[in-house]
Image: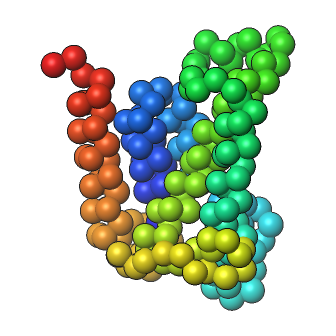
Amino acid sequence: MTGRGHRISAFVRLMATTGSPVASSLAALGSTFPDRVERIFGLFGKGPNRHHRRTSHWFALYGAAFALCFYVWGDATPPRLADFPRLLTSPAWSVVFSCAAFWFLGGLLHVLCDACCGKVPLLIPWKRTFGWKFFQMSKARGEMSRGEAIFTGFIALSCLCAWLLRYAQV
């Protein structure tokens, strides 16, 4: 999927489940991390996408990081905007780990979305064994294909309906 599709789907999923714009934004920012880390380390260097969706898209890595941050974090309340100024004066580790947990959850959602349009590694980082090909990606870099747009729109509308059912006062 493209970065835009990852950010939209991560944001709407977390907004529907937590109702927290801060947690949703952290997940949306973290949802582009697996592709960005490949560019940072230059893994696209030899051949087109030769190393794409390997260690940087390892499902177990993001799942373990999220579980560790969630375990250290303690309470189950998402971070709030009012918590961030407090971080500048005295680091509240529960807020730091809750932000990290939602960041890694965004990465985990990225891997799950990529598993819908190809294979990703599940337990072994160098073997792509988990995933399906529900839609084709566009050949143009950064352009959403028709299938990705439909997939992302379906996720967004489903999450909007779930959010309305959960949080709207009807």
Of residues 40 and 19, the one nearer the viewer is: 19
User: Is residue 78 toward the left or the right of residue 94 in the image?
Assistant: left
Looking at this rendering, what residue extends furthest in the left direction?
170
* Residue 52 place in picture, x, y as percent: 65, 76
* Residue 111 place in picture, x, y as percent: 56, 62
**Please, is residue 67 above or below residue 96 in the view?**
below
User: Is residue 77 toward the left or the right of residue 84 in the image?
Assistant: left
User: Is residue 118 toward the left or the right of residue 78 in the image?
Assistant: left
Of residues 60 and 50, the one nearer the viewer is: 60
**Please, is residue 17 above or below residue 109 in the view?**
above
Image quarter of residue 166: top left
Looking at this rendering, what residue extends furthest in the bottom direction?
47
Looking at this rendering, what residue extends furthest in the right direction?
90
Residue at 31% across, 70% down? 147
Of residues 47 and 92, the one nearer the viewer is: 92
Q: Quadrant of the C terminus?
A: top left
Count up the numbered dots: 0
Task: Tell me if residue 12 can be seen.
Answer: yes
* Residue 55 place in picture, x, y as percent: 72, 70
Residue at 82% across, 19% down? 91
Residue at 25% across, 30% down? 164
